[in-house]
Amino acid sequence: MPFDNAHPSLVQALTAKGYAEPTPVQAAILDPALGVRDLLVSAQTGSGKTVAFGLALAPQLLGEELRFGAAKAPLALVVAPTRELAMQVQRELAWLLGPSGARVVACVGGMDIRQEAIQLHQGAHVVVGTPGRLCDHLDKGRLKLDSVVGLVLDEADEMLDLGFRDELEHLLQATPPDRRTLMFSATVPAGIESMARKFQRNAARVAVATGEQHADIEYRAVVVVPREIERVIVNILRFVDAPGALVFCRTREGVNRLQMALAERGFAAVALSGELGQAERNRALQALRDRRARVCVATDVAARGLDLPDLGLVVHAELPNDPAILLHRSGRTGRAGRKGMAVVLVPGAKRRAAERMFFEAKVEPWWIGPPSADTIRTRDEVALRATVTELAADVQEVDLAVARELIATGDPERMVAALVRFQRAQLPAPEEVSEWSAPPPAPKRERVQHAQPGQAGQPGHSEPPEHGFDPNAGPQMNGAWFRINVGHSQRADPKWLLPMLCRRGGIQKQHIGGFRVMRHETRVLIHSGVAERFLRSISRPDPADANIRVVQWFGEE
């Protein structure tokens, strides 16, 4: 059984939720060698930390019992930096400890403090809250911490960054000295180490390998002209078309300016910054959760603790200050087994700084230019044709009757053109941006298969890395990359891919600059002079290769 060392009542909850095996941080927490020691755990957002500290605390809270007794003073206290994160933790612990009959209460700013007081008076096994609100209840005698056997500080580094040191120390001092203390932090700066030495006893340091956090995130470094950053962001949002996107800016002013610019162009965008009141913040978050808004523009502080549905894209509008910020921001996507993309905008003058940051973060991005307006328009046309073809297969007779009347009374071509114009008007217009002529060198050299003009390339003996390509290897070609849905596992070989692409795409062998054959897909470089024509031709169904799909590669299709 995957969760061999977990408490039986938690195994029941995990099985019901469909958990097949623990994440790396959960597996580390379940290591029998740790016993009941205090823990200082460094792990990134989205790594399954909430379930991890639930797994760690259960033996102290339940012992040999399968169910909790009557709820009285809390046995465990969990402190989180933001209201959203605390509420998320409360929901996670509620289902995880549900089979054991646990009562999990949340105490956070922005909620009715009187209702929280009633819940605390009725008793709780676990209390989850933000530092300020917990201290309010503690100082007024509504929160009793003398029965706490387990205490968790979640995202402790962020709580220090937000200025909660005094509140944290106040809460820690109010709990029994023999409690078990678990500190979870994406990074372990000096302040966290100092707090650990002061409030933990013989703590074990658990550092979860960071390599796994990149597995479901595709990184892109987009070279931009500084004055075109807003326009580039518009084109990226239009091209990737993720269900949800989070754009990071450094300042409130930058957030407000970009949000207004996106809204003016027709994007459903909301802003999150420190100047918003709780009611405004709640309205913005609700718009994102019920999908009335698709784009959130935020500062680092304002975005902490966000749990957004279907977040497929993170855009760093400004270069992060250090690798930890890059990873923490990007970790908002690519969670729970979903694929995600992180796009970092890199002004030409900051290229070297960006390369150094990626190297230190152990991230290998794919260096690309911004999608052009023409590329987006071509993609729109392909999508429109596909949508119309799909809808036409299931039209009703009542719709056909209206169509016949329109055709009989007017010019069919103009009527279809009017519908096309109406459909285009629903989408924000793409922006004209500068062409990208010379990519910077990738942080790590990578083998790329190049087809010489007039001949096919040879398949490689090893699978190339997923991220980036080395533009300095082999013949140079200024072009666009396309993705084919076959790879090594389907015995993909440039020897037969090349003639197929030429036939379906209406191009010549010399227009193909190289292949990258990977496990489940292949990427091919097409000369920029024929790329748009190739895209239009290759998108048409072909009975001879009905199962082969070729799309332009920029992100998740």
Image (cartoon, rainbow, N blue to C red):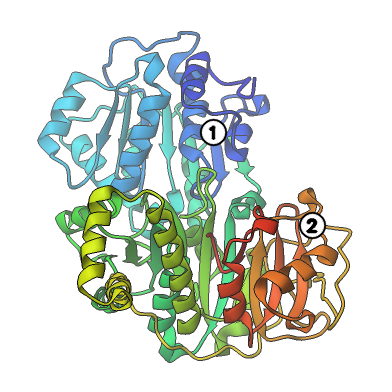
Left or right side of 519 for 106: left
Disc 2 marks which amino acid? Ala
Position in image of residue 243 (x %, y %): 39, 56
The answer, for residue 27, to whether it is visible in the render is: yes
Neighbours of disc 2 within 10 Å: few (<14), some (14-19), many (20+): many
Which residue has dot 2 on it? 492
* Callout 2 touching callout 1 (CB < 8 Å): no
Tag 2, which secondary structure? loop
Q: In which quarter of the image is the N terminus?
A: top right
Residue 150, placed above or below residue 481? above
* Point 57% across, 34% down: residue: 26
Secondary structure under tag 1 reads loop
Which residue extends farthest front? Answer: 408
List x then y, in percent, for residue 16: 47, 21
Quickly name the residue at label 1. 38
Q: Which residue type carries mark 1?
A: Asp
* Cα distance in 3D space between marks 2 and 1: 51 Å
Q: In the rendered image of this protein, does residue 19 appear above or below residue 556? A: above
Residue 520: give x, y in percent of width and height: 71, 52
Name the quadrant containing residue 507.
bottom right
